Image: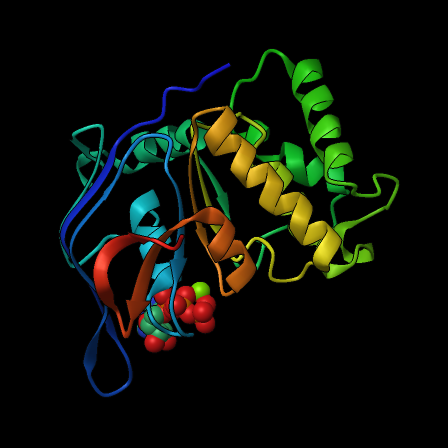
């Protein structure tokens, strides 16, 4: 089933951070347009602003200046509670450090986004969560997340991001802790989301193999765009 993904557009975006003695620009992007259904890699050295960009796209941080529009609507205009609700159903977000709750089981972690809502179809959601974990090869019998390997935790984070079947997936280094086989499974999954299902997938990655496979690259350096914005790697 093809998903209706939104068009994402960034204009004159600036994120200024403060350190102990001064302010500095963590991210500065004049224009970035991501067409619905794109599969795009964000690359660049450590500290170049990749995570900051994903946070800004998801409305998880408030930029110092600029606009982030989804289907023409500036998400920064939404009130905080409205933005949270919108995000839960629009974006699957895989955090670089996972943001899993170590004392909960893998299943409970995947179901976590459902606990913020009045979800009537609890059994359905549970079935979906189990299928996602199974599909990613995560052992489900572990008592807590703390008992999983880092690579397994990473796949739990990905499964959680997909719980509500979102039209957009923003993934921060989704293959960083995976071996070649598990990395391949995730790469294939990202491709399918976009090519088969029509989702927009934006993945931050250092992995040259994944960048090559993804085909569209947006490169940052010290908070600025390197080269001519989005380009094809092939
Ligand atoms: N909350 C913050 N306060 C101050 N500086 C910050 C904050 N968040 C990020 N930075 C700085 O902004 C710059 C960009 O950070 P960001 O996390 O976006 O980089 P990144 O490209 O994701 O790096 P990595 O590949 O290491 O994850 C870095 O120099 C970082 O130290
Ligand atoms: Mg980062």
Q: Is residue 223 above or below residue 183?
A: below
Q: Residue 134 appears at what percent x and percent y?
A: 78, 33
Q: Nearer the viewer, residue 85 or 90?
A: 90
Direction from residue 198 to residue 71 in the image, left or right? left
Direction from residue 223 to residue 197 in the image, left or right? right
Direction from residue 55 to residue 138 in the image, left or right? right
Q: Residue furthest right?
A: 141
User: What colour scheme does the image use?
Assistant: rainbow
Q: Residue 11 appears at what percent x and percent y?
A: 13, 48
Q: Residue 36 appears at what percent x and percent y?
A: 32, 30
Q: Residue furthest front?
A: 234
Q: Quadrant of ligand 2?
A: bottom left
Q: Residue at x 51, y 25 (%)?
A: 196
Q: In this orientation, does residue 152 appear? A: no
Name the quadrant containing residue 159: top right
Q: Is residue 165 above or below residue 43?
A: above
| Number of numbered markers | 0
Q: Residue 102 appears at what percent x and percent y?
A: 71, 54
Q: Residue at x 38, y 55 (%)?
A: 233
Q: Residue at x 83, y 56 (%)?
A: 147
Q: In this orientation, does residue 38 appear? A: yes
Q: Residue furthest bottom?
A: 21
Name the quadrant containing residue 221: bottom left
């Amino acid at each position: 089933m093809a998903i209706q993904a939104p068009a994402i557009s960034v204009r004159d975006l600036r994120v200024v951070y403060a350190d102990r003695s001064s302010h500095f620009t963590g991210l500065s992007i004049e224009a970035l347009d991501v067409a619905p259904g794109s599969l795009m890699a964000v690359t660049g050295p450590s500290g170049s602003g990749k995570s900051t960009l994903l946070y800004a796209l998801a409305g998880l941080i408030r930029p110092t200046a600029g606009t982030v529009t989804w289907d023409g609507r500036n998400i920064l205009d939404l009130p905080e509670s409205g933005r949270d609700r919108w995000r839960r159903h629009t974006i699957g977000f895989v955090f670089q450090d996972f943001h899993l709750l170590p004392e909960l089981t893998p299943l409970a972690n995947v179901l976590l986004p459902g606990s913020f809502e009045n979800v009537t179809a609890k059994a359905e959601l549970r079935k979906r969560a189990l299928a996602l974990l199974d599909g990613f090869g995560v052992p489900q019998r572990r008592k807590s997340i703390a008992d999983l390997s880092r690579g397994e935790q990473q796949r739990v984070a990905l499964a959680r991001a997909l719980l509500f079947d979102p039209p957009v997936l923003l993934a921060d280094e989704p293959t960083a802790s995976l071996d070649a086989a598990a990395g391949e499974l995730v790469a294939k999954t990202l491709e399918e989301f976009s090519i088969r299902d029509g989702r927009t997938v934006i993945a931050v990655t250092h992995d040259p193999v994944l960048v090559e496979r993804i085909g569209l690259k947006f490169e940052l350096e010290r908070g600025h765009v390197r080269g001519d914005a989005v380009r094809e790697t092939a």
